[in-house]
Amino acid sequence: MTESNQKLLDHFMNPRNVGIIENPDGFGRAFNPVNQYLTDIYLRVKDGYIDDIKFKTFGCVVTIAAASALTKGIKGISLSKIFDSESSLKILFEVIEKELGVVPEKNWHCPPTAIQSLLVAFSDYYQKVHDEQRVKQIENMLKDIQCFFEKGLREK
């Protein structure tokens, strides 16, 4: 077994940040049309940083591992580090890759579900604090992430 597979299986067998945050600052739900899995992400923001983050998912090994890896990797990070970058989506994918290693090509459609639910949670948060510029930025990111699902549906 490769180190990458061990890391992925560790996140599946011992997922981090599983659960619900009552009255979250942001909540996001994403449905993956390729595999029919659902991921929820709850977040708490304090002073511009992700203070707490939890997830619940109905999914396969890679879907669960990706949500665990993403929540572990961004907990404590500043929102500006993500959203003030020209490559915000790349940053989020790199967080998962750093935690999991390389995801098998046949499962590339799984990690975007975690990222999509996180983006919806961020959008929820920014709507609550009335930051329309960030909401629009996230809407564009969500459009970009749709290509992963569309590619997966074509290959199915």
Image (cartoon, rainbow, N blue to C red):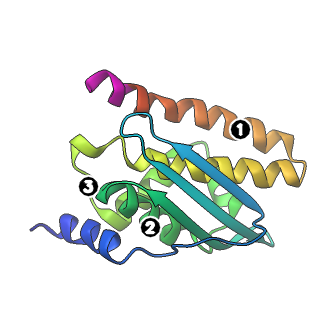
Percent x, y of residue 27: 69, 56
- In three-dimensional space, the C-alpha distance between marks 1 and 3, rounded to whole angstroms, equals 28 Å
Dot 1: what SS? helix
Q: Any mark on residue 68, and which?
A: 2
Real-space Cα distance between discs 1 and 2?
Answer: 25 Å
Q: Residue at x 58, y 69 (%)?
A: 54
Mark 1, residue position: 137
Quarter of image, res 1:
bottom left
Q: Does label 1 or label 3 sit earlier along the sequence?
A: 3
Residue on which the image places disc 3 = 102
Q: Is residue 36 above or below residue 81?
A: above
Inspect the image, locate mark 3, and give the three-letter code of the amino acid beneath it. Val
Do tag 1 and tag 2 residues touch (Cβ < 8 Å)? no
Closer mark to the observer between disc 3 and disc 2: 2
Which one is earlier in the sequence, the residue at label 3 or at label 2?
2
Q: Is residue 110 visible?
A: yes
Instruction: Write the start and end of the magenta stretch as one range.
Output: 151-156
